Image (spheres, grey):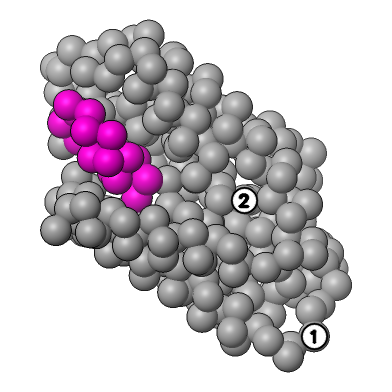
Amino acid sequence: MLTTIQALILGLLQGITELFPISSLGHSVILPSLLKWNVNQSDPAFVTFIVVTHLSTATVLLAYYWNDWQKIIAGVFRSLRVRMIATDDTYARIGWLIVVSSVPVGILGILFEKEFSALFAVPLYAGIFLIGNGILLYGAELLMRGKVATTASDEHIAHASWTDAIKIGLMQCIALIPGFSRTGATLVGGLLVGFSREDAARYSFLLATPIIFAAGLLKIPELTLSGESVNIMSFVIGAVTAGAGAYISVRFLTRYFKTNTLVPFALYCIAVGAVAVLLNL
């Protein structure tokens, strides 16, 4: 059972690391081990706590991009009404691109849930995969060198092809492994299909919202019916601090990626992952 301080720290950590390209799940697995907390990370109550903090993060993202989601949802319904997606209907197309990008991770998450869950509570594996996440981010920046950045705009995102959307969705599947970042994977996917860093970050945050909500809403009934006792107060503290961390993160990152690169995050992941590996060998 998490204490109040543990819930506060883990909630804030999850809210920040979920949107930074440094893996929230990886950090949630590694930190309790580093601090020698007596926490059973395979316990359904702990998993439920992580799910609740994810839902809090998704709620903040929904609120932050509420005006955009109103346009996207209206665009999708508009396209359904006329039974076509007009090439100049920017938000309808963005909405359907998000749907297409969500399909791969949804399928793999359902088919291989047990296999991915087995990796969740192993700090050594999380450290190894966090190093892999850093290498992935750094490799993407190497590929970007010498390329002229495109101007950030919703219209540019909307001109991505359905194949591009699938590629980003496939990249996102890597984040099913604790240690690989969902934000990082989708950012890299966006860069590889020609988005600017700013557009890749924006698309990543929009894409995260329905996926995190869906994963949380599917998981909570299962965990609730498990009969495990839970500490409601730790859940509330975790949700509030995760929401605060997510808001700070999205505000910072939407500005950061206008002019900056993934390199600092790559180096951070490699360093933290290496420490986690050394301490858990």
Nearest the viewer among 42 and 268 is 268
Measured from the top left, where is residue 128 in percent x and y?
A: 27, 64
Q: Is residue 53 visible?
A: yes
Between marks 1 and 2, how big is the CA–CA gap? 23 Å
Q: Is residue 101 left or right of residue 170?
A: right
Q: Residues within 10 Å of mark 2 (few under 14, many from 20)?
A: many
Q: Inspect the image, locate mark 2, and give the three-letter code of the amino acid beneath it.
A: Phe
Magenta segment boundaries in residue numbering: 26-41
Q: Which mark is residue 57?
A: none
**Residue 84, located in which quarter of the rendered image?**
bottom right
Q: Inspect the image, locate mark 1, and give the three-letter code of the amino acid beneath it.
A: Val
Nearest the viewer among 231 and 112 is 231
Residue visible at 45% across and 68% down in the picture: 134
Q: Is residue 276 left or right of residue 196?
A: left
**Residue 50, located in which quarter of the rendered image?**
top left
Q: Is residue 232 above or below residue 10?
A: above
Q: Is residue 76 above or below residue 58?
A: below
Q: Residues within 10 Å of mark 1 (few under 14, many from 20)?
A: few
**Residue 252, located in which quarter of the rendered image?**
top right
